[in-house]
Image (cartoon, rainbow, N blue to C red):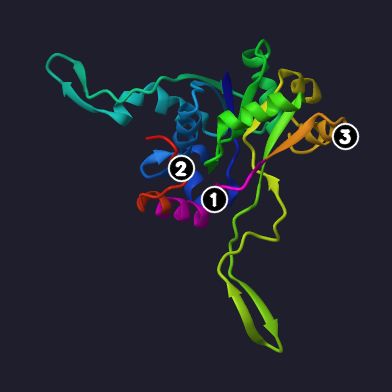
Amino acid sequence: MKAVILAGGLGTRISEETSTRPKPMIEIGGKPILWHIMKTYSHYGINDFVICCGYKGYVIKEYFANYFLHMSDVTFDMTNNSMEVHHRSAEPWRVTLVDTGENTMTAGRVKRVADYVKDDELFCMTYGDGVSDVNITELIAFHRSQKVKATLTATIPPGRFGALNLMENKVTTFLEKPKGDGAMINGGFFVLSPKVIDYIADDNTIWEREPLERLAQEGELVAFPHNGFWQPMDTLRDKIHLEELWQSGKAPWRVWS
């Protein structure tokens, strides 16, 4: 099974980092968040990736073209014009990098890679800027049991601010960063039939609007509830939070050994 990863957006809300590289290449623990997402899928046996590139996509292509340089020790022999790679750190990945346009919307990017998934029974799809400890094997099994065209992962968004209960200006309770109002949201990590591509008109189609709305109306969209960890990297604050979790040695999304 393949995993399609949307990695072409501009990342304007974290412009401190994206002026020189695409958002999925922002590093957590010295590795791009894209790498973390791929490691999650790989842990569950999915090693065939289709990356939808756009804004500064050449940075992503360079990273994989020189993966051994990024991940291994090397010796350059200038006299003999040779390079020796030591302790190769290889992943069992097959990575297809597709230029899906700098200004293409989310669904438009999926349509642009249709040829790479059209003959598959199912494919996974997610955004290139969020990590989770969702069990991909259970997600796929759930999708198959529902006999629908699309499954999304429903999750509770992380809280950002301390919540107060007030009575006559006195704080009666304080809860540090509660998880919103308990309402679940689209957390990405989809399992899809290639038939969903028929719901996408063109480059300007936004996945979260017409396609998902129509799939829902037709009873072809179900939600896999995930009550564990999920965190997007929308802002510099989010990036710092993820970095702190990684450095603590207790990053919840690190399901691989």
**Disc 2 element:** loop
Quadrant housing the N terminus: top right
> Would you name the residue on which mark 1 appears?
14
**Label drawn at residue 57:** none
Q: Which residues are magenta?
A: 225-244
**Residue 58 seen in the current view:** no
Cα gap from disc 2 to disc 1, whole angstroms: 10 Å
CB under 8 Å between callouts 2 and 1? yes
User: Of the residues tagged 1 and 3, which is closer to the observer?
Assistant: 3
User: Residue visible at 50% across and 35% down?
Assistant: 37
Say above or below: 78 vs 175: above
Decide: few, some or many residues near mark 2? Use Cα within 10 Å; few <14, some 14-19, many ≥20: many
**Mark 2 or 3 closer to N-term?**
2
Q: Amino acid at mark 2?
A: Ile
Say above or below: 37 vs 171: above
Say above or below: 158 vs 152: below
> Would you name the residue on which mark 2 appears?
26
Q: Is residue 14 left or right of residue 256?
A: right
**Mark 2 or 1 closer to N-term?**
1
Q: Amino acid at mark 1?
A: Ile
> Would you name the residue on which mark 3 appears?
217
CB under 8 Å between callouts 2 and 3? no
Q: Is residue 231 magenta?
A: yes
**Disc 3 element:** helix
Instruction: Where is residue 109? Give x, y as percent.
Output: 66, 27
Quadrant housing the C terminus: top left
User: Residue visible at 31% across and 30% down?
Assistant: 71
User: Residue visible at 67% across and 10% down?
Assistant: 119
Q: Amino acid at mark 3?
A: Gln
